Amino acid sequence: MRARTPNAGEFYRVDGALTEDKPTKLKFKEGDLKADWAERGDVEVIALQKWAEIRMPITALNAAARVATLSGDCPKWIIEDQARYWLENALELVDAPGEWFLDRKSGVITYKPRAGEDPDKIGAIVPAMDHLVRIEGARNLRVQGIAFSHADWSIGPKGYSDSQAAIDYRGAVRAQGAVGCSFENCIVSHVGGYSIDFSKGCRENRIDRCEVTDIGAGGIRIGETAIRKDDADKTLGNIVTDNPIHDIGLVFPAGVAVWVGHSAKNLLAHNHIHDTCYSAFSIGWSWGYGPSGAQENVIEQNLVHDIGRNMLADMGGVYTLGTCTGTVIWNNVFHDIWSSTYGGWAIYFDEGSTGVVAENNLAYRCKSNGFHQHYGRENTLSSTGPRASCTPATGTATGSAGRRTCSGIPPARKGCRRSGRSRGWTRSR
């Protein structure tokens, strides 16, 4: 682990809130920051805001006023009062077993061994690239049983201020224009951004039984933030099944286990997602009722638990955004969803979510509730069994449709099957 203070699991608190100045300023409490950290220019503040984080070097420090100036700006909509933060990247912070510090000028790594480790037998891998594989225009490529590991990350001179989902960080394995390709029984680990990334023009590809772990940002990315007009440029019809995705968001906590942007007709099924700092699934990338390319996605029979880990807020097991007409969320199990403050929901319809069906899901031990709708329309929350199955810890589900009592475990349903209809996937009965 990169050397930090306070050590893992502990935090400092901002005295008030980050400012809207350009660059932003942080008021710290007596004794938390040292004046010479600003002189070095590479000691980083990582501050957890509402649903995203900032990671920025300290550039100036007024000890008398207890104010540190950071390297970049922080969007006002994510600023949180009394936010938690920690610091990284100083030699004197190496004080806990497993922590390390790299002096980039000298090239010397300082490491504090864990109990039982022999310093003479420890090896260090220093990645030099932010991605390992780039695939462009491939057809029917099959990748089996390969481990992809050790890709770097960077933040630039102004640091990094996330807007949502660590969206600026691509995959270590990234594809564009790939059709009919598959990744099977692979491992992606120890990378700084996302793992596998299907972007512009990727169609009918498959990620199956691939483990994703020890990831700096998020797990799997499908689609883009841009809406493509030409059919050949659209990303759709991809399959993500039976993948264990865990221990992600270790550098950029807002990373999502499976992020789907403007992409349609994808199947996300039988995945086991746990130990994340933010949402498990994120579908859509349009705020409100405007154009969106995230229609007719299926999220079914996934096991999602122990997400959030009290790191960020405004999150869910499945998070939808914008017009997602024809998207269905069914037969999933969600439990132990723990946001930092508000918004630890199993199913969360955020701004403008439209045309989504959530059916026959089971949720319990959620920080807030099993279901929440910010604003949206033409959505359905239901169960095929005699009782609803969106059971939060409180035994209630809330949303714009009102309040209902939910309890009971739903009957088993068969999954999805291929359909000749335009949606691509339909329920099997």
Image (cartoon, rainbow, N blue to C red):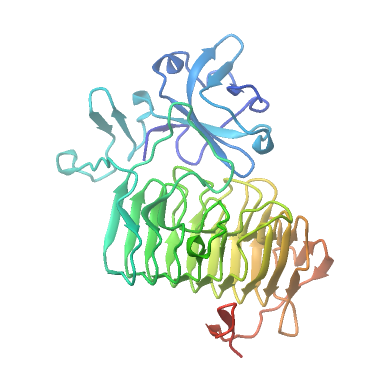
Q: Position of residue 301 (x, y in %)?
A: 55, 75
Q: Which quarter of the rendering shows the C terminus?
A: bottom right
- Across and down, in percent, residue 248 comes to 45, 52
In the orientation shown, which residue stands out farthest toward the left? 120
| Image location of residue 187, percent across then percent down | 32, 62
Res 270 seen here: yes
Q: Is residue 116 left or right of residue 348?
A: left
Image point (32%, 40%), residue name: 98
Q: Quadrant of residue 42?
A: top left
The quadrant in which the N terminus is found is top left
Residue under the point 64% across and 47% down: 313
User: In the rendering, at what x and y percent does residue 189 appear?
Assistant: 34, 54
- Residue 219: which quarter of the image? bottom left
Single out the residue that lies furthest toward the bottom.
429
Residue at the right extreme? 402
Residue visible at 56% across and 79% down?
425
